[in-house]
Amino acid sequence: MRVVIAGSSGLIGTALVASLRGKGHDVARLVRRAPAGPDEYQWDPPHGSLDERALRGTDAVVNLCGVGIGDKRWSGSYKQAIRDSRITPTEVLADACAAQSVPTLINASGVNFYGDTGDRVVDESAPVGSGFLAEVCRDWENATSAASSAGVRTITLRSGVVLSQRGGMLDKLRPLYLLALGGRLGSGRQYFPWISLDDEIGAIVHGIEHDAVSGPVNMVGPAPVTNAQFNSAMSRAVHRPAPWIVPGIVLRAGIGEFAQEAILTGPRAIPTVLEDTGYVFAHNTVGEALRAAVGR
């Protein structure tokens, strides 16, 4: 199959390119700079431009574009960047997929779609929640409508926190835990939706290769955990105590709105679509995922 990937230079994109090529798929990448090889095509989402050759003969487009939600403190301008860096590229690709009759569009989203659900278990049928991130995810998914309306099989990846020591949150946390500076955040009762990098990639490939997968897909491990349970599992994985407690008021003061939306609250999401379509997880528990990523 020929797969075109936007956002291929990040943690997930890099691993996805390697996995697909390892399975014998033809992979092309969309880049904003001048192309450096025959597998690259230039595009400029803010101006709506895309090399018309990029999607010729393509079986699936995977869009992973978007600035990190936790990379900077949430100023008004950064919140706008979070929205624009997701929605604008999605609209460009959805229009292009519709125009060129690409069979499949797989578009990133986030499990933050559900907002704070407390102890309530949520699958893909649950409604959108409240808050900035929930609204971004709603609008991000809606931006694929040109493709889905044209009959393109459209998948939206409602991803949890991807666990890998090669980047993302775990790359920042591991040094703290190794120094026995890890601990519970806030009450610790809030849910922490997680997925291993191996399963994030495996589930995307599953979606590419299986036509039964469509619509929203919860990209989370099959065993939900709270923040306190994650902290305990991380402590065991690195063989260090993690006794500290960071009060919510301290996190809100230091990090701002991001702390309330993405750290101190979280949905208890389960991967119903993946399980119903036959995906087999490499890591069924957060302990397995952490031992694989950071175990010593």
Image (tube, grey):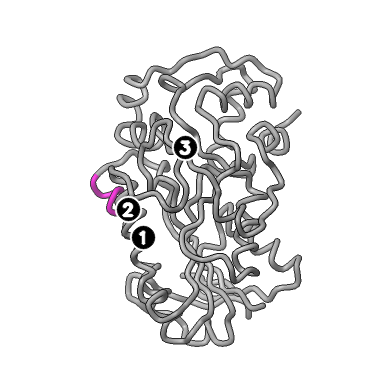
Q: CA distance from mark 3 to mark 2?
A: 19 Å
Q: Position of residue 25 (x, y in %)?
A: 70, 73
The local crowd at label 2, few if under 14, some if 14 to 19, many if 20 or more residues have their Cα within 10 Å, is: many
Q: Which residues are magenta?
A: 76-81
* Residue on which disc 1 sits: 140
Across and down, in percent, residue 14 comes to 62, 58
Residue 32's tag is none
Q: Residue at x 36, y 21 (%)?
A: 248
**Residue carrying label 2:** 136
Q: Is residue 195 magenta?
A: no
As shown in the figure, which amino acid type bears the numbered disc 3?
A: Arg
245 or 98: nearer the viewer? 98
Q: Residue at x 69, y 42 (%)?
A: 283
Neighbourhood count class around disc 1 (C-alpha, 10 Å): few under 14, some 14–19, many 20 upward: many
Name the residue tied to disc 3: 268
Q: Indicate yes or no whether the magenta region holds residue 78.
A: yes
